[in-house]
Image (spheres, rainbow, N blue to C red):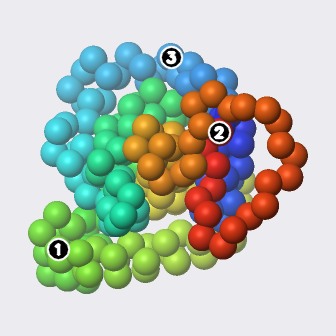
Amino acid sequence: MDRRELLKMVALLTGGAVIGGEVFLSGCNNTDTTAKTTTTEGAFSNDDIAYLDEVAETILPKTNTPGAKDAKVGAFMTVMVTDCYPEADQKIFREGMKKLDDASNKANSTGFMKATPEQRKNLLVQLDKEAKDYNKNKKPEDPNHYFSMIKQLTLMGYFTSKPGATEALRYVAVPGKYEGCIPYKKGDKAWAT
């Protein structure tokens, strides 16, 4: 699957344009923010990565296929935000991590990491609805919604990871001959290549 197809799929799944999509297509040459990775201010901590893994795992939990945590989506998100997002979106993403935890405290009287799986799921369903409503009425100059960023990066990170591509999707490392029409059987996985 090439980058353009992936971006189309993520945009379709999340109901909006992929945040930072133009940067992903150009290869993440965000030189202004790359320098931040060497400073303490710009770097994500191991706790941040663990937190993002838990959020991602709530979005894509482990079933008979690996979950987002198995695909190390939290680490993927931190690299993409630091290296590919413009500074304004990096700030929104980081503030969004705090807002998500604050929303968990408000709804469940506990932070996201200590919430039960059901509490986490209910919170993220509510935030997803909020983000979709926001994006419906969003003007081009309005900032991006933090949960849209988190969800898009979760999907992108998962389906481009080895576990996501090889175990959640049908994967052929070296495709054979071209077949323009392959019959679909109900329950078949989507193709990764």
Q: Quadrant of the C terminus?
A: top right
Badge 2: few (under 14), some or many (20 or more) residues near its Cα, within 10 Å? Answer: some
Residue bearing mark 3: 31
Residue bearing mark 2: 193
Q: Which residue does the image show at 72% across and 38% down from the upper left?
A: 4
- Relative to 123, residue 178 above or below: above
- Relative to 70, residue 39 above or below: above
The answer to whether any part of residue 78 appears in the image is: yes
| Residue 159 vs residue 8, the one in the foreground | 159
Residue 78, percent from left and from top: 35, 37
Q: Nearer the viewer, mark 1 or mark 3?
A: 1
What secondary structure is found at the residue carrying circle 2?
Answer: loop
Residue 106, percent from left and from top: 23, 80
34 lies left or right of 2: left
Q: Which residue does the image show at 61% across and 63% down from the upper left?
A: 188
91 lies left or right of 102: right
Q: What's the distance in space between the residues labelled 2 and 3, CA to CA?
A: 31 Å
Amino acid type assigned to the residue bearing label 2 in the image: Thr
Q: Looking at the rendering, which quadrant does residue 185 occupy? A: bottom right
Q: Nearer the viewer, mark 2 or mark 3?
A: 2
Q: Please report whichever mark, 2 or 1, sits nearer to the chain's N-terminal start.
A: 1
Badge 3: few (under 14), some or many (20 or more) residues near its Cα, within 10 Å? Answer: few
Numbered label attached to residue 115: 1
Q: What's the distance in space between the residues labelled 2 and 1, CA to CA?
A: 37 Å
Badge 1: few (under 14), some or many (20 or more) residues near its Cα, within 10 Å? Answer: some
Q: Quadrant of the N terminus?
A: top right
Q: Looking at the rendering, which quadrant does residue 182 occupy? A: bottom right
Amino acid type assigned to the residue bearing label 3 in the image: Thr
Amino acid type assigned to the residue bearing label 1 in the image: Ala
